[in-house]
Image (tube, rainbow, N blue to C red):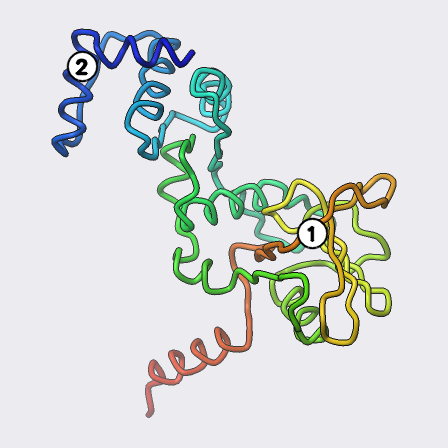
Amino acid sequence: MLSLSTFLRDAGEFKEIFKKLSAGVSPIVVSGLSHIHKAHLAAAIRRVTGRPVYCIFADDFAARNASRDIITLAQEDAHILIRREFTFYDVENASHDWEHERIATLYAMADARAGLVFTSATALMQRTLPPALLLEHAIILKSGHEYVLDDVVARLAAFGYKRADIVETQGQFALRGGILDFFSPSMKNPVRIEFWGDEIDSMGEFDPDTQRRIANLTQTTLLPALETFMTADIREKLTQKLSQLEVSD
């Protein structure tokens, strides 16, 4: 696949595309390509330029299908930004898998780690939290460092995590003495942290089925489990904003 990217870089019309990209020309319109040729072009642009490539499709289904081809050609993992699903009534057991996937992708984009992103026009038009706010509230936990356990638990609750007896799915956390389990949208497996007082003594990923540790970690990232969340500082800013909007009689 790498040789294909090299070939496209030096071939006719593709060479002209790369030339315009290097010159900062945007947008560039390309027509007459079949589905697989679009995948070839996107993969080649990513491999040759090293720049982030965002592919926009008609809907989430088309984005997921196209992502499989381009991931194979580019030999790189990709992120999918799906549209938000709105629920206008309280459903305790409603799935938030789609929201966790969005948060993980949005964080990768905000942190400049998303090289390939597949999305739909609808998903791009939906409002979400600002990148700076997401980065500000992402908590980096490091082994050997000190954190107030009660504060971490309070953050989990404010970020939309649900407390459970055992952690099995994203958006859950469990606390047993000085042992904290949580499943962040940024992780493929849940994380178990063992505290010694306020210091993280050890941490690692564990299998949600067996609950056994499968890998040791030196640090992990705790992301919000919801796109809309309420922390103390956000509540204070919102209160100040509402006070400014009050109209006296």
- The crowd level at tag 1 (other Cα within 10 Å; few <14, some 14-19, many 20+) is few
Tags 1 and 2 touching, CB below 8 Å = no
Farthest-out residue, front: 144
Q: Label 1: state its secondary structure.
A: loop
Q: Which residue is mark 2?
A: 15
Q: Amino acid at mark 2?
A: Lys
Q: Amino acid at mark 1?
A: Val
Can you say whether 35 is above or below 47 in the image?
above
- In the foreground, 237 or 197: 197
For the C terminus, give its image quadrant: bottom left
Relative side of 194 to 8, left or right:
right
The spot of residue 157 in percent (x, y) is 67, 66
For the N terminus, give its image quadrant: top left
Sequence-first tag of 1 and 2: 2
- In the foreground, 153 or 215: 215
- The crowd level at tag 2 (other Cα within 10 Å; few <14, some 14-19, many 20+) is some
Can you say whether 141 is above or below 72 in the image?
below
Q: Which residue is mark 1?
A: 91
Relative side of 234 to 243, left or right:
right
Farthest-out residue, bottom: 249
Using the image, tell me which numbered label, if any, was put on residue 32.
none
Report the residue at 76% width, 64% height from top: 201
Q: Label 2: state its secondary structure.
A: helix
Report the residue at 40% width, 55% height from top: 131
Can you say whether 175 is above or below 35 in the image?
below
Report the residue at 35% width, 42% height from top: 125
Quote the CA–CA distance across marks 1 and 2: 53 Å
